[in-house]
Amino acid sequence: MTDTKRKAVVLVSGGLDSATTAAIAREEGFRLNALTFRYGQRHEIETQAAARVAASLGVERHVFLTIDLRTFGGSALTDDIEVPKSGRVEEIDRTIPVTYVPARNTIFLAFALAYAETIGAADIFIGVNAVDYSGYPDCRPEYIEAFERLARLATKVGVAGTTFTVHTPLIALSKAEIVREGLRLGVDFSLTHSCYDPTPQGWACGFCDSCLLRRQGFDAAGVTDPIRYVGHVG
Amino acid sequence: MTDTKRKAVVLVSGGLDSATTAAIAREEGFRLNALTFRYGQRHEIETQAAARVAASLGVERHVFLTIDLRTFGGSALTDDIEVPKSGRVEEIDRTIPVTYVPARNTIFLAFALAYAETIGAADIFIGVNAVDYSGYPDCRPEYIEAFERLARLATKVGVAGTTFTVHTPLIALSKAEIVREGLRLGVDFSLTHSCYDPTPQGWACGFCDSCLLRRQGFDAAGVTDPIRYVGHVG
């Protein structure tokens, strides 16, 4: 039976969004081929979380790609500049945050497309979200549609008639809805990692924008977040 | 004066096409920011040629990026499979050659876009050619236009109104025309490297598809190719 299932490439970062996205792809009947980028993060904790998450979801292959986005600079997630800590979720800058990495999703989707064409997949899953990350241009539906169009023109199989679909099942969901959807699908959120500024042992800071959104999401979903936060949080 | 010139990102592979493309960008008055990929080639000769070519053209910055396309497989240029040697230029497979790398130009342009946005450039130069490489889907004008559209939607500056232009000055030129244009602009072709299968000391094989196209181009232009070929060629 397994062989008759279609393959999908799923971008897995180790965060709760991509974990839920992968679980949705699995529920839709796809064979999961995970792709994780090491891209100049200040820590390997995300990569380890990605490996755990993918294994827990039964991916058939997991490719890790190292790319050095620090070469170009321009973001708190890749440079040695201070991660912003708004302190309160209402204070997060929803325009275009300092954590924006130029063309990041275009680079990620380009590699996903190469992976997809190589393994004979026409489906790519990415956990972008236009609600919490409304300031990121490459998280919007019109961007995703433009990439799908490009993918058809960019590839041998596209020219031969294959239509690539970039699935963004989370694009219009709130964080609370993502948490509930993940729980419904059996995602083990204790394996995930979201913090931009964790302790050396991997505990979340609780106050970076990513932690704030995550905590608010679990709160609004009425569920306890199973990950470990530093000190007074959680 | 220099500071008032606009910056451009130029993809430089070390081959004669990208050398001529960079020379055209310079002639058009751009400040050149070169980008070269190390992508699982079997030899470092191309990278060295790229460094020589860029230096000879006075680039103001040269970024080298290592990406491992072998992770996905699928091409003679990145895998350990035999490079095709047609022997005669008429026998080159112009459909979709074995040297096709899935989504290669999409990956290259995605990084070029990240570079461009980071340095405040809106112009990218790439030496794609739809004549000699008609089999590559990502060398066609409609593909380039789709990427330009994506670039506008993908970036902070695009959303703010910047229009990215992907310049493809060679797209409709024959190899002979490229050689002549390069010579007119003072490109030193002795610095370039085209061969898919060079000797350890960097001499060109003379018979891979890339060598055949290059040799035919110089022949048709009525010019002697200054690079060193193995034995009986050149």
Image (spheres, coloured by chain):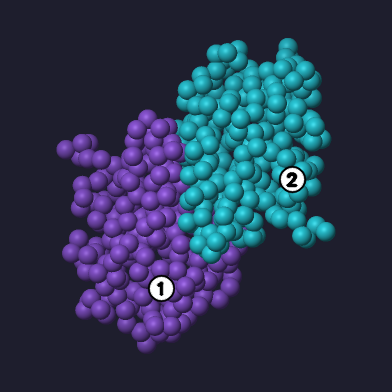
Chain colours: A purple, B cyan
Q: Secondary structure at mark 2?
A: loop
Disc 2 is attached to a residue of which chain? B
- Snapshot quadrant of residue A74: bottom right
The quadrant in which the N terminus of chain B is found is: bottom right
Disc 1 is attached to a residue of which chain? A
Q: Residue furthest bottom?
A: A232
- Snapshot quadrant of residue B4: bottom right
Front label number (1 vs 2): 2
Q: Nearer the viewer, residue A220 or B231?
A: A220
Q: Which residue is mark 2?
A: B28
Disc 1 from disc 2: Cα separation: 44 Å
Q: Is residue B218 left or right of residue B157?
A: right
Mark 1 Cα within 10 Å, few/some/many (few <14, many 20+)?
many
Q: Secondary structure at mark 1?
A: helix
Amino acid type, residue under disc 1 in the picture = Ser
Q: Is residue A139 visible?
A: yes
Q: Is residue A12 visible?
A: no
Q: Is residue B188 above or below residue B35?
A: above
Q: Is residue A72 above or below residue B27?
A: below
Q: Is residue A140 above or below residue A224?
A: above
Name which residue lies at 25% across and 40% down: A6
| Image spot of residue A214 (x, y percent) | 34, 74
Amino acid type, residue under disc 2 in the picture = Glu
Q: Nearer the viewer, residue B101 or B69?
A: B101
Q: Is residue B183 above or below residue B92?
A: below
| Image spot of residue B214 (x, y percent) | 68, 23
- Snapshot quadrant of residue B119: bottom right
Q: Which residue is mark 1?
A: A210
Q: Is residue B181 left or right of residue B109?
A: right
Name which residue lies at 58% across and 52% down: B164
The quadrant in which the C terminus of chain B is found is: top right
Mark 2 Cα within 10 Å, few/some/many (few <14, many 20+)?
few
